[in-house]
Image (spheres, helix red, strand yellow):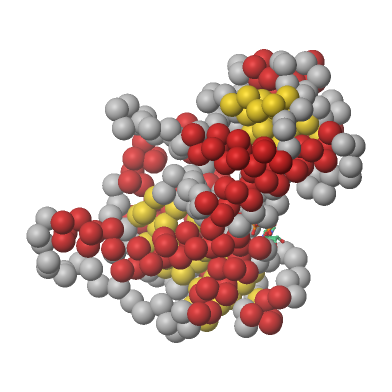
């Protein structure tokens, strides 16, 4: 199949070209993100391959349909950026990579927790400058602390397992019943209880209408004073302005983000010579107890190999008219 890739980076090209040795699709890598203005570039394609911040809304899907694009292959797990009803209406199927490496994201979650707690990012700079003073670097033992996980799916459960290894007491809240929780020693509980007693709260649910701004002024008010909040899931699960208020009042003592609700205008690009015009984001950056990474939790060699392999298999299955294991339905 002729596949048009949007928002591609060098690492996408490398991993997909390698994995395509087993498939022989024609891969066309475009740097530009997908939106209403760039959708026409899919004109010659049978399918498109998109990433987390590509806009796959009704207007884009109608353009695809006009040019006979038959499949949208997401090279990620989340699908909040796709209008699934509009896709079904124009007869375009959508596939994704539901699980590629929950370890990649869970381990990055721990990287954020450990860095914020033990301030290794600040220590690194101090030691480089010959400053060996320790003031301001006091952390706390993770052992014995209570961590609340919102969402106990693939990533939430791997995160729970790692935290158990640290000797943490792990609480979980999920709208579904999660059988593995008990085996792992994770105590499932109501959201309010989790908010009230967790020292660290980490988000692992998808972005849906129900989870949009789940972390807001009301839910922050219920949290422990001095809480650590971590989001490696999707930016809009957090109301950023409410979190900034929580940081200013010192209710929130640590914030670790790999995702941000307006990241589409910032992340994955080198803007170091540009003026960043997002004042909310710049305010976040001004706190020394806030650590932000640019949506890189997925970025391991293992995850990239899985993403490329599963995405191309999804495309091959579609071409062969096979049942689509990873289809996303409205
Ligand atoms: P998953 O589908 O295995 O698990 C999600 C869990 O959240 C499920 O158990 C589900 O029941 C639960 N859930 C749904 N709605 C909920 C709600 N309202 N309240 C509480 N729980 C709810 O997904 P996963 O593989 O664990 O991934 C979780 C999320 O992580 C993805 O949706 C994606 O947005 C994000 N993600 C981020 C990155 C990154 O690079 N930062 C990479 C992969 C995935």
Count of numbered tags: 0
Closer to us: 93 or 310: 310
- In the rendered image, residue 99, in percent from the top left (x then y), is placed at 68, 55
Closer to us: 85 or 95: 95
Residue 278 seen in the figure: yes
- In the rendered image, residue 181, in percent from the top left (x then y), is placed at 68, 76
- For residue 17, which quarter of the picture? top right
Closer to us: 238 or 323: 323
- In the rendered image, residue 220, in percent from the top left (x then y), is placed at 49, 61
- Residue at (22% x, 62% y) in the render: 123
In the displayed structure image, the side of residue 171 where residue 279 appears, left or right: left
- For residue 171, which quarter of the picture? bottom right
- For residue 23, which quarter of the picture? top right
- In the rendered image, residue 133, in percent from the top left (x then y), is placed at 12, 68
In the displayed structure image, the side of residue 127 where residue 97 appears, left or right: right
Outermost residue, left side:
130
Outermost residue, front side:
21
Which quarter of the figure is the C terminus placed in? top right
Which quarter of the figure is the N terminus placed in? top right
Residue 86 seen in the figure: no
| Depicted 263 relative to depicted 227: above or below | above
In the displayed structure image, the side of residue 301 where residue 245 appears, left or right: left
- Residue at (77% x, 42% y) in the render: 314
């Amino acid at each position: 199949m002729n596949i048009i890739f949007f928002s591609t980076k060098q690492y996408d090209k490398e991993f997909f070209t390698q994995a395509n040795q087993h498939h022989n699709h024609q891969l066309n890598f475009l740097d530009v993100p997908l939106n209403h203005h760039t959708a026409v570039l899919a004109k010659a394609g049978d399918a498109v391959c998109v990433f987390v911040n590509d806009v796959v809304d009704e207007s884009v899907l109608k353009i695809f349909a006009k040019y006979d694009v038959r499949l949208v292959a997401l090279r990620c797990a989340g699908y909040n950026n796709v209008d699934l009803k509009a896709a079904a209406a124009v007869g375009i199927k959508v596939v994704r990579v539901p699980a590629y490496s929950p370890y990649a994201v869970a381990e990055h979650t721990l990287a954020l927790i450990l860095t914020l707690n033990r301030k290794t990012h600040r220590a690194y700079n101090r030691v480089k400058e010959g400053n060996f003073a320790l003031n301001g670097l006091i952390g706390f033992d993770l052992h014995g602390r209570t961590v609340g996980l919102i969402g106990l799916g693939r990533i939430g459960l791997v995160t729970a397992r790692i935290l158990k290894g640290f000797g943490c007491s792990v609480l979980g809240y999920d709208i579904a019943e999660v059988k593995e929780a008990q085996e792992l020693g994770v105590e499932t509980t109501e959201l309010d209880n989790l908010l009230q007693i967790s020292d660290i709260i980490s988000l692992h649910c998808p972005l849906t209408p129900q989870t949009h701004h789940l972390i807001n002024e009301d839910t922050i008010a219920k949290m422990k004073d001095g809480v650590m909040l971590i989001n490696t899931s999707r930016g809009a699960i957090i109301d950023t302005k409410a979190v900034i208020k929580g940081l200013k009042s010192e209710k929130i003592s640590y914030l670790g983000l790999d995702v941000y609700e307006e990241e589409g205008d910032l992340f994955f690009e080198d803007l170091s010579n540009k003026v960043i015009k997002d004042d909310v984001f710049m305010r976040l950056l001004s706190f020394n107890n806030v650590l932000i990474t640019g949506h890189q939790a997925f970025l391991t060699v293992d995850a990239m190999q899985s993403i490329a392999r599963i995405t191309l298999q999804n495309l091959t299955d579609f071409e062969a008219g096979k049942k689509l294991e990873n289809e996303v339905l409205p």
